[in-house]
Image (tube, rainbow, N blue to C red):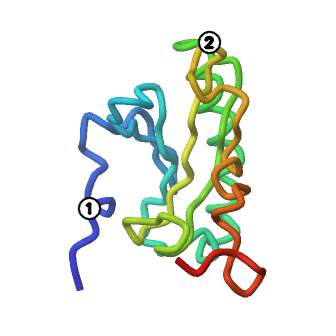
Amino acid sequence: MTKCPFCDISDSEQVLFEGNLLFFMSTNDPTLVESGMILPKAHRETVFDLTEEEWAESFTFLAKVKTYLDEKYRPDGYNVGWNVGETDGMSIAHSHMHVIPRFDDEPLAGKGMRNQLKQPENRRPSQGGSTG
């Protein structure tokens, strides 16, 4: 099994703050400069593996992250979500909640997380979509 890159990251400069069970880190994405992730300190492969305590702290942590991002960047909106499994785009099997501030001047402003999924070319073959 490959070592999880998120399990030993708590000393990283990317970690902006920590709770008892979770931490918030910046993603260092050159396009989504202001974005970050909330992660459990314990290895949990997906959001469905979180404990009740981790769920509860996720809720309070998200409010703390929003306050921080609101004060620092003054976004016009947010996308918040988890990817689960490779099909959904999860590239590291350690549960992480994406927190992405959105701004009115973005080229894709007004297009939510589901926009790409709702395109006709994403229709599954079993639902009458393209097979190739």
Residue 125 location in percent, x, y? 67, 83
Q: Quadrant of residue 118?
A: bottom right
Query: As drawn, is 37 to the left or to the right of 11?
Result: right
Which residue is at a point 70% across and 70% down the rendered structure image? 123
Q: Position of residue 116 (x, y in %)?
A: 63, 51
Question: Horizontally, is 84 left or right of 118 in the view?
Answer: left
The residue positioned 73% from the left and 87% from the top of the image is: 126
Looking at the rendered structure, the kind of residue marked 2 is Arg
Q: Residue at x 65, y 52 (%)?
A: 57
Q: Is residue 69 above or below residue 22?
A: above
Q: Which residue is mark 1?
A: 5
Which secondary structure, mark 2?
loop
Q: Is residue 107 above or below residue 115?
A: above
On the image, the x and y values in percent for residue 33 come to: 40, 26
Q: Amino acid at mark 1?
A: Pro
Tag 1: Cα neighbours inside 10 Å, few (<14), some, or many (≥20)? Answer: few
Residue 46 picture location, percent across and down: 54, 72
Q: Is residue 108 above or below residue 119?
A: above
First along the sequence among labels 2 and 1 = 1
Q: How far, Cα to Cα, is label 2 from label 1?
A: 30 Å
Rate crowding at label 2 as few (under 14), some (14 to 19) or many (20 or more) other CA atoms within 10 Å: some
- The foreground one among 69 and 29 is 29
Nearest the eye: 42 or 111: 111
Residue highlighted by disc 2? 74
